[in-house]
Image (tube, grey):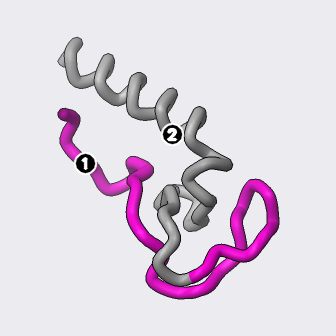
Amino acid sequence: MSRKRGGDPYRTNARFNSTCHTCKKQIRKGEPIIYWPNGCHAAHFKCDEADYNHSMSLIADEEQFQ
């Protein structure tokens, strides 16, 4: 499993109501989300799952080659 760094996206549950960066629909407190620290935005897990998985793949590759 890769180490979490400050700017890496991560899965969590919403701590408050907000708006999904991708679909622009409401995120309700407690829903599973992906938080993108570099952009300071959140998205429903299902909306950004592919981008999140791609990012995790790139991070794992980077760690392997270091």
**2 left or right, relative to 24:** left
Q: Residue furthest top?
A: 65
Q: Is residue 12 magenta?
A: yes
Q: Disc number at residue 4?
A: 1
| Along the line of sight, the residue nearer the viewer: 13 or 22 | 13
* Picture residue at 25% right of the left edge, 48% below the top: 4
* Picture residue at 56% right of the left edge, 41% below the top: 49
User: Around disc 2, counting alpha carbons within 10 Å, would you say few (fewer than 14), some (14 to 19), or many (20 or more)?
Assistant: many
Say which element carries label 2: helix
Q: Amino acid at mark 2?
A: Tyr
Rendered location of residue 17, percent (x, y): 61, 85
Q: Which residue is mark 2?
A: 52
* Picture residue at 67% right of the left edge, 49% below the top: 47
| Along the line of sight, the residue nearer the viewer: 10 or 49 | 49
Q: Which region is colored magenta?
A: 1-28
Q: Amino acid at mark 1?
A: Lys
Is 24 above or below relative to 15?
above
Q: Quadrant of residue 21?
A: bottom right
